[in-house]
Image (cartoon, helix red, strand yellow):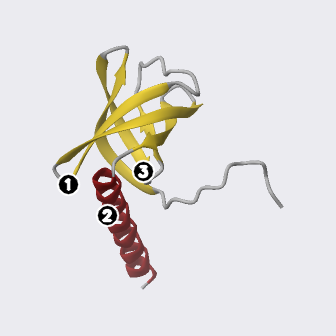
Amino acid sequence: MDSGRERRIDTRVPVDLAAHLELKGAQVPVRAVDLSVGGALLECRNLDWPEPGEAVLVSLALDGRRLDLLARIVRRSGEIRAAVAFESMDGACESALARFVRARDRQRLRTHLHLLG
């Protein structure tokens, strides 16, 4: 049965990464709290988040490389979080993001299996 919610096809991993959101020409520091090749959940206190559908530029530093990603606000989650969907990126950027997510996902799985014992 379809719940009406959009089905995610990208693996999403929890993270705690410094990032920046470009709003009206200013760089606003935010935190990425989860990440996939298709998007991210961003967190920032005291920010008037753009409305869903608005385009933004998200900058992340992954493994020493800065990624500038054109994104669109998908939804706001409470007052401090917003989900973004990445709109477009070049192949090198997509590969770097995919490698990072796969590595984090494997690390999470190893930790989970270790805890199970």
Residue neighbourhood size for the residue with mark 1, other residues' Cα within 10 Å, grouped as few (<14), some (14–19), many (≥20): few
Which residue is at a point 58% across and 27% down the rendered structure image?
Answer: 52
Which residue is at a point 41% across and 19% down the rendered structure image?
Answer: 46
* Position of residue 50 measured from the top left corner of the image (x, y, whole percent): 50, 21
| SS of the residue under disc 2 | helix
Q: On residue 63, which mark appears?
A: 1
Q: Quadrant of residue 89?
A: top left
* Position of residue 71 measured from the top left corner of the image (x, y, whole percent): 45, 35
Which residue is at a point 43% across and 54% down the rendered structure image?
Answer: 37
Horizontal relation, residue 87 to residue 60: left or right: right
Mark 1–mark 2 contact, CB under 8 Å? yes
Residue neighbourhood size for the residue with mark 3, other residues' Cα within 10 Å, grouped as few (<14), some (14–19), many (≥20): many
Give the residue pinned by disc 3. Answer: 35
Q: Quadrant of residue 43?
A: top left
Give the residue pinned by disc 2. Answer: 99
Name the residue furthest bottom. Answer: 117
Q: Nearer the viewer, residue 72 or 92?
A: 92
Amino acid at pointer 1: Asp
Which is more N-terminal, label 2 or label 3? 3
Q: With respect to residue 6, does 75 lie above or below? A: above
Q: Nearer the viewer, residue 49 or 59?
A: 59
